[in-house]
Structures are given as structure tokens and as C-alpha cells.
Image (cartoon, rainbow, N blue to C red):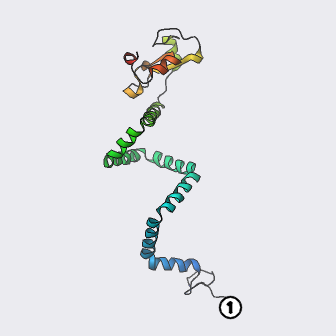
Amino acid sequence: MVRTCCIDGCEASYYSKGMCKPHYRQDYYLRNGSRERANFKSWRIANLDHEYARWAAYHAEHKDELAALRRDKYWADPASAARKAAEWRERNPGKCDAWRKSNPKLWAMRNRENQRRRHRDKPVDYVAILEEHGMVCHICDCEIESMAGLHFDHVIPLSKGGPHAADNIRPSHAACNLRKGARLLEEVA
């Protein structure tokens, strides 16, 4: 005769103390959970290198999935995410400043990307801008020969608070626009 689990409705075979293995483990952790958690925490502290390596391997293997989860969580409630980020910056002002100072190029690049993202949803009619101003560079006042050499420049850069609107956008040579960068015309030598 095969003994079965004593838990009602479970037909699994007997393991120990009248229960199947899953029910026995559940009962064990209900009785000894705090001790098991303390043991596990002390083990993790003693083996931090192992834990960091395991964490890094997992994140490298699941990079795209984790990025999608973070993105979905952010877009589910962007106001809450922004509030939490602001609270973190308030609690850790030195960390923000230290990172910003040690990574000036990366900070500038992220700042530009954020500005572009903020203004991406505002449509601008570039054909109307060309009809109004013609193929003349607003920086050097010379004719723009081809569409390949055409850029559209924000007269007041987004980083200086300029709007992404038709009255702030002018045609320019690619080289002139890149030389001007995120500066005002007066600042360009």
C-alpha cells in the first residue's frame, strides 16, 4: 500500500511527517521562516562577490527584458517615477553632482536626448519653414546648394529654453549648424 499526503485533496506520495514534499517544505518554512531568512541573509553578506557576479550575469542575460519592464513601469505612471527620482536626488545630492562632474560628455548627451524627447511630440511643418525662409542659411547668409547639405537649426537652442516651434527653426548649412552647436548666434565666433 502506497502512503499519500495527509493534506486534504492532495494525492501525492508520502515524504515525511505524513506530507508530500511540497507540503512538508511549506510547513517547514512556516515554522522556521525567520531563522531561514536570517541564515540566508548572513550567507549573502558573507558571499557578496558571488552575489554580485550572479546579479551581473542575470542582468547581462536579460538586459532587454529588464529594460522593457522598467520602461513599462515608468510609462504606467510617469509622474510617480519623476517624483521618486526627485526624492532620490534630494536624499543623495552628492551622488548626482559627483556623477555629473565625472561624466560631463555623457551628461551633456543625455541632457540633449531628454530635450529632444520632450519636444518630439510637437509637430513642425518644415516645408512651410523652407517656403518662408528659402534655401538660405540663417547663420552665414549664403545659399544652401542641395538638400543633402540642409539642416534645420533652433535659433534659440532647446538647451537654452528655446521652443520647438516654427518661429524658432531656420534652415542652415549642415556645417554651420554643427559649428554653432547649442549656442546662440552671438556666441559663435
Above or below: residue 65 compared with residue 10: above
Q: Across the whole image, how many numbered discs are drawn on residues? A: 1
Outermost residue, top side? 142
Above or below: residue 22 compared with residue 53: below
Above or below: residue 162 compared with residue 19: above
Task: Check disc 1 and give the amino acid type.
Answer: Met
Q: Residue 128's x, y, as percent?
A: 51, 16
Outermost residue, bottom side? 1
Q: Is residue 45 left or right of residue 25?
A: left
**Quadrant in which residue 13 is drawn:** bottom right
- Pick the residue in front: 152 or 78: 152
Q: Quadrant of the C terminus?
A: top left
| Residue at 59 percent of width and 13 percent of height | 146
Give SS at disc 1: loop
**Quadrant in which residue 22 is drawn:** bottom right
Above or below: residue 12 compared with residue 97: below
| Residue at 53 percent of width and 8 percent of height | 143
Tell me the residue that label 1 is attached to: 1
- Pick the residue in front: 22 or 51: 51
Q: Residue 107's x, y, as percent?
A: 42, 36
The crowd level at tag 1 (other Cα within 10 Å; few <14, some 14-19, many 20+) is: few
Q: Residue 172's x, y, as percent?
A: 50, 16
| Residue at 47 percent of width and 49 percent of height | 73
Q: Quadrant of the N terminus?
A: bottom right
Q: Is residue 129 left or right of residue 158?
A: right
